[in-house]
């Protein structure tokens, strides 16, 4: 052979446009090829992240998600399609990425990540990208990344805004900034909404920062973006917290959440306050059906003769408590309704919840109900 290269012909042809960049060059492409990156969450953020990392030539790409593809995901989760609705997200993503780049190694982790498995999974990778919307997972990932010396990027998007935290080398961690996990009243995309392209912007930036970490960037910072006002802000993160047990003592604080199998935080009321759909429909005049979702979700589609009182506006002085009928709270899955009902049961109100919420209405009563 009359020529030589540390890269294969295929790598040169595929990646030449990025190899030309002085910050990458041949040495950088070899680092990318040898890297192992785990992406947690294969939704709106994870979609552009895994796509760009795969096409950049990341040698080993780990895909972690416990969920299946839903029709409502397709508005922003671009690695999934109508053909993969109801499939595991890891499998859907695997199929998409193999079509983009068949030369890389892809590992599937079809599970939720938490205190009981985070260390074992994270230890297999160099860089961890948190693209999920689960606060309990975020702390588990952060703590184990810090203990294992892994570089870590987390991001989130809601409505028109997004943010990225980059934690590189031996700097501070997420717990330095937010010591105590708070899960109460946290709203996600299903409740507050999100613009699809916002996921593309933030996820793409996350992929950029991951590649920079592979190339030995060592800066920790917070980047925020308001898509409606088109404003970026960047803040350097340099100072570790002296109160952070993870950074100062290399210890994971006692979990406020438990293992990943029990991460969905619920307030459960006694079964006698749970009304099944068949019982409600048999005698609907006994109840005042109160849909506690936000107004836009209610306006999209709701149960006939129900009234809308969003949970965040509901107090004991509300007009619904003047009604002589039994108050029956309704939400998407029955979880938020139980939290609301528990509060008013403590105050002596005659309230109930629809067991399973609109999710069970769709599965048990009308499969055509457009659940979002």
Image: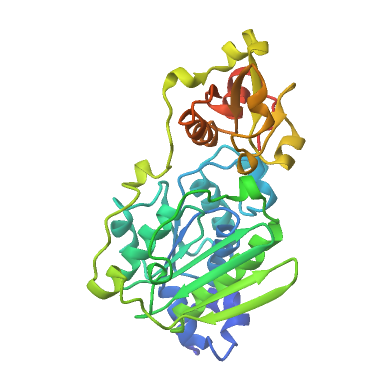
Horizontal relation, residue 371 to residue 268: left or right: right
Examine the image and state in which quarter residue 164 appears: bottom right
Q: Which residue is drawn at 45% across and 78% down?
A: 214
Q: Residue at x 55, y 32 (%)?
A: 337
Examine the image and state in which quarter residue 216 appears: bottom left
Q: Residue at x 70, y 61 (%)?
A: 197
Task: Give x and y (percent) for residue 332.
Answer: 59, 34
Task: Give x and y (percent) for residue 144.
Answer: 32, 63
* Pick the front one: 229 or 347: 347
Question: Does 276 appear above or below 60?
Answer: above
Examine the image and state in which quarter residue 140 appears: bottom left
Q: Residue at x 67, y 47 (%)?
A: 74
Coloring applied to the structure: rainbow
| Camera sees residue 80 | no
Which part of the image, by quadrant, shows the C terminus? top right
Task: Give x and y (percent) for residue 166.
Answer: 48, 74
* Pick the front one: 296 or 25: 296
Question: Does 73 appear above or below 216?
Answer: above
Task: Give x and y (percent) for residue 18.
Answer: 59, 81
| Camera sees residue 352 | yes
* Pick the front one: 254 or 32: 254
Horizontal relation, residue 115 to residue 283: left or right: left
* Pick the front one: 97 or 330: 330
């Amino acid at each position: 052979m009359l020529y030589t290269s540390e890269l294969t012909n295929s790598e040169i042809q595929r990646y030449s446009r990025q190899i030309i960049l002085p910050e990458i060059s041949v040495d950088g492409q070899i680092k990318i090829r040898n890297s192992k990156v785990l992406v947690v969450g294969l939704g709106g953020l994870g979609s552009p992240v895994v796509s760009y990392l795969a096409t950049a030539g990341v040698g080993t790409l780990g895909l972690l998600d416990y969920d299946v593809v839903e029709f409502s995901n397709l508005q922003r989760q671009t690695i999934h399609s109508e053909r993969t609705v109801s499939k595991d997200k890891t499998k859907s993503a695997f199929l998409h990425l193999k079509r983009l780049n068949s030369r890389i190694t892809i590992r599937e982790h079809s599970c939720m990540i938490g205190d009981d498995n985070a260390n074992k999974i994270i230890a297999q990778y160099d860089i961890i990208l948190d693209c999920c919307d689960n606060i309990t997972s975020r702390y588990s990932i952060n703590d184990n990344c810090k203990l294992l010396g892994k570089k870590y990027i987390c991001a989130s998007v809601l409505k028109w805004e997004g943010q990225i935290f980059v934690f590189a080398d031996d700097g501070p961690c997420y717990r330095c900034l937010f010591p105590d996990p708070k899960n109460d009243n946290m709203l996600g995309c299903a409740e507050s909404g999100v613009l699809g392209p916002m996921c593309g912007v933030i996820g793409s930036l996350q992929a950029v920062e991951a590649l920079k970490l592979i190339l030995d960037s060592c800066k920790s910072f917070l980047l925020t973006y308001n898509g409606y006002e088109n404003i970026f802000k960047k803040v350097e993160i340099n100072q570790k917290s002296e109160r952070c047990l993870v950074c100062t003592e290399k210890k994971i604080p006692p979990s406020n959440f438990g293992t990943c199998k029990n991460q969905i935080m619920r307030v459960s009321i006694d079964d006698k306050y749970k009304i099944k759909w068949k019982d409600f429909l048999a005698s609907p005049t006994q109840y005042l059906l109160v849909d506690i979702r936000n107004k836009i979700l209610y306006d999209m589609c709701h149960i006939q003769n129900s009234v809308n009182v969003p949970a965040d506006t509901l107090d004991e002085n509300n007009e619904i408590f003047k009604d002589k009928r039994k108050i029956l709270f309704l939400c998407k899955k029955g979880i938020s309704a139980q939290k609301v009902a528990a509060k008013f049961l403590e105050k002596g109100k005659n309230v109930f919840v629809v067991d399973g919420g609109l999710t069970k209405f769709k599965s048990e009563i009308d499969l055509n109900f457009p659940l979002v």
